[in-house]
Amino acid sequence: MCKHLNVITLQNICEKHTTAVLHYSQIEIFQRHEFHTSEPRRIPPIVAIIIRPLVQIGAFVFGRAFKKWWKKKTPEEQKVYINWLKSRKNAFFGFLGFFLFALFLYYVTHLQIDPITKRPRFIIFTKEQQELFAKLTLQIHLEENKGHIVPENHPVYMRLTRITKRLLNANMDLQSVKDKQWSLTVVDGALKNAYVLPGGHIFVFLGALHLVENDDQLAIILAHEMAHELLNHSMEQVSRGVILDMLLALPIVLLWAIFPDAVAAIFQILGASVINIFHHLPYSRALESEADDVGLILAAKACFDVREAVVFWGIMRMLTELKIEKDIPPILSTHPDHGDREKHLNELMPNAIALRNNVGCSYLSPRDPRNTFYMRTKKDHELYFKLRGITST
């Protein structure tokens, strides 16, 4: 989606709790360019979340109830109903066509052009609804990590805050950066993870810091998470999930109405697996790659050493090759393969470095960290990870 960004594109793109809020004054909201002229009908986020399981459960209940009702009918009664349906097949297919057209029309009228990537995206929520959803989601995650959030004077917290501020200050030319009240929460946990919630609330676990070597690699991680929010990936995923569940409602009804329960259950599980492997997971990987691309731009504009992005994913690749981290088959993963990310970011590096130079950053050290990384043998990496405390043997 952003795999062929050139230098010109790169230049164009690119409360008191234990959580500190990095607040920036709200400035005029950027104008969205959408494929409609009338006001679209938005669905409240909570309703959208409730609709998804209700549609699937409702389809299952209706299909199964219809099957029981049908079995109670005599062959003569069934024949009458079949003949009645045949006589009205045009009306039935007309209704089905109208339903599919209405869904298509709803989809088209809720497409927006992303201001950063210029990619069309499907969003069913207003800005106000997204803000409400962000507040609710933040409270849930704060409650989940209650008692494990590090204080604001924690060295790691201060380090991450400094990097986050630098990224934000360097990218204030992006309206979507200005419009959010960014926050950072650091969780005292061994989980090697970082993520961003709707609204710009970044969560980083202390365990994630064991994988990075310097502030530049930390900036790459934070910029990646910020990119997810700037691209509104979370709201896009929820929106697509709603429309997909609506499309699957009728097939689920027919499945449970026609087949025995055991067969229907097997088919539904198989169908869900196929949809997951061939739609959900590739879509998730595409969003991760898009966040990698935009995150690299954010880091470049903040004058970080963007070459460390390649080194970080090289480290992740090596950790999986040495069986230190889990190696999930790419087709079953929500994220691209570590090696693929390493290679892709390396391909983008000339443009990223050019952008970094164009915004007035000091020149990078002639000592390329990628060369240092690639000069290590597998044994060197094993010893290096042991010295860093990543492994104990």
Image (cartoon, rainbow, N blue to C red):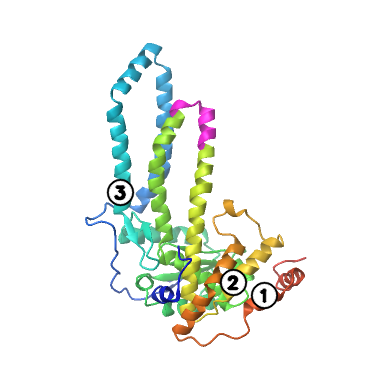
One can see residue 233 in this view: yes
Q: Which residue is mark 2?
A: 310
Q: Classify residue 373 as left or right of residue 230.
A: right
The amino acid at mark 3 is Tyr
Name the dominant secondary structure of the magenta segment. Answer: helix
Q: Position of residue 188 (x, y in %)?
A: 58, 67
Closest to the observer: 272 or 58?
272
Label 3 environment density (alpha carbons within 10 Å; few <14, some 14–19, many ≥20) = some
Q: Which residue is mark 3?
A: 106
The amino acid at mark 2 is Val
Which element is circle 1 on?
Answer: helix
Of the image marks 3 and 2, the number of the one nearer the N terminus: 3
Q: Is residue 337 above or below residue 247?
A: below
Q: Residue at (50%, 82%) from the top-left corner?
A: 303
Asked if marks 3 and 2 touch (Cβ < 8 Å), the reply is no
Which residues are the magenta region?
Answer: 257-268
Q: Which residue is mark 1?
A: 373
Which element is circle 2 on?
Answer: helix
Of the image marks 1 and 3, the number of the one nearer the N terminus: 3
Q: Position of residue 251 (x, y in %)?
A: 42, 35
Q: Is 39 covered by the magenta stretch? A: no
Q: Is 264 covered by the magenta stretch? A: yes
Of the image marks 2 and 1, the number of the one nearer the N terminus: 2
